[in-house]
Amino acid sequence: MAIRLPDRMRRLQPYAQTNLEQNAAVLTTPHDVYATIVDIPKNRSCSEAGIQPHWCACVNWKNVTDSTMIQRTAEAFVNYINQLTEPQRSLCVPRTLKEVKWVMVQAPNKGVLSFVAAKDRDGYMGKFGKAIKIPKQTYQI
């Protein structure tokens, strides 16, 4: 979507252009065009934006506190990097793990996992069922 504010509006309300530019990278909904020219919090959640849980593309991350899992995850990452660089081993040494500062695991959105179909014509209301199982977990190290 492209928006160009009228010259008169930009003169009388210069903040609107500034907000429009800043809000280009902030969570809004297609139903919320007016929000593009007002101040929108940078950390706006789907529920604050009026987005139903089954349409929320936001990803939550949880700190991993299990030290065994932290070590296993970090070592798996180092092993993966070493496998990628194996063909060039004459040019680079294998990586080793020195320390782990933090590890986070992706926490999937329950609304997305249990969404089956739309209940209404415009897809706003969702029909939910049993949540699907995620075969893999995603970590940040």
Image: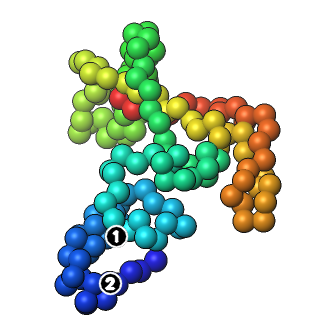
* Residue 72 vs residue 57, the one in the foreground: 57
Q: How many marks?
A: 2
Neighbour tally class for label 2: few under 14, some 14-19, many 20 plus, Cα within 10 Å: few
Residue at coordinates 52% horizontally, 32% vertically from top-left? 107
Determine whether, in the image, residue 11 is placed left or right of residue 120. Answer: left
Residue 50 pos. (x, y %): 54, 53
Q: Amino acid at mark 1?
A: Ile
Label 1 or label 2, whichever comes before in sequence order? 2
Residue 67 pos. (x, y %): 39, 10
How are the colours assigned in the image? rainbow
Instruction: Classify 135 as above or below 122.
Output: above
Determine whether, in the image, residue 80 is placed left or right of residue 88. Answer: right
Neighbour tally class for label 1: few under 14, some 14-19, many 20 plus, Cα within 10 Å: some
The C terminus, quarter of image: top left
* Residue 83 vs residue 130, the one in the foreground: 130
Q: Amino acid at mark 2?
A: Leu
Label 2 secondary element: loop
Is residue 77 shown to the viewer in this render?
no
Rounded to the nearest whole Å, what is the CA distance between mark 1 and mark 2? 9 Å
Residue 32 pos. (x, y %): 49, 66
Residue at coordinates 33% horizontally, 51% vertically from top-left? 41
Residue 115 pos. (x, y %): 72, 45
Q: Residue furthest bottom?
A: 7
Residue at coordinates 27% horizontally, 84% vertically from top-left? 9
Instruction: Find residue 85 and report its image quarter.
Output: top left
Instruction: Classify 28 as above or below 80.
Output: below
Q: Residue furthest front?
A: 12
Instruction: Classify 20 as above or below 43.
Output: below
Label 1 secondary element: helix
Pointer 1 residue: 37
Pointer 2 residue: 5
Query: Pointer 1 and pointer 2: residues touching (CB < 8 Å)?
Result: yes
